[in-house]
Amino acid sequence: MKKTAVFLLLLVCFTLFYGCKKTEDGSYVAPIVISEKINGVWALTSIKQVDEIAKANGEATTEMVLTDQFNFASFSITFQVDANQLPNIYSVSGTAPGLLSPTGFWDMDYAYPHTDGTASKINLYSDATKLAKTATLDILTIPGEKKVLQFTMIRKINGVPFVSYTYQLSIQN
């Protein structure tokens, strides 16, 4: 009994002294935001047009690949961030049809991926105050190890989708 009491006393003392040891966790690092991953120049690798009305009606032919048509292969978009990795300005270049405004400002609906599985959104604006929205892009693939960005732009009339464009882009060095 005496040996057990001594052992327990030593164990308690050791635990108290060990508990006083300060653990170095490092310095605070801000979490990575989606805009940090999107920052850069993105060149089109493919674009697909989807007839949303035909799709809603269950018709067979609803998609058309536009990559090699209308000079879409020349399309690129640049997303720039400020010093704090927050969305700033964007610009579109190339001779593809102007589905997106050539320049403007952008932001995200939420800085991090949604936990409920819904698509993150890039909002495009024509003004620095971000009051005049020109388009919303639903992000399908967030760049990670593979430097691929994929988003969809859905065009609507009176709130009803009639056509969508799915862009797949790769980062330019």
Image (spheres, rainbow, N blue to C red):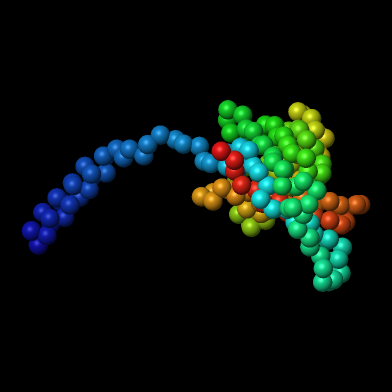
Where does residue 144 sit, x and y in percent of width and height? 54, 49
Q: How many marks?
A: 0
Q: Would you say 120 lies left or right of 50 here?
A: left
Which residue occupies the extreme right position in the image?
158
- The residue located at (78%, 40%) in the rendering is 95
Q: Position of residue 64 (x, y in %)?
A: 79, 60
The residue closer to the viewer here, 79 or 159, is 79
- Give the residue drawn at x 79%, y 62%: 63
From the viewer's perspective, tell me whether residue 84 is left or right of residue 100: left
The residue depicted at 77 percent of the width and 46 percent of the height is 71
Q: Quadrant of residue 8?
A: bottom left
Q: Quadrant of the N terminus?
A: bottom left
Q: Is residue 142 visible?
A: no
* Residue placed most toward the observer, 140 or 130: 140
Relative to 142, 60 lies left or right? right
Q: Nearer the viewer, residue 155 or 40?
A: 40
Residue 162 visible at all: yes
Q: Horizontal and vertical percent for residue 33?
A: 57, 41
For image coordinates 78% across by 52% down, the residue present is 69
**Displayed quadrant of residue 82:** top right
In the picture, the quarter occupied by the C terminus is: top right
| Image quadrant in which you'd find residue 22 | top left
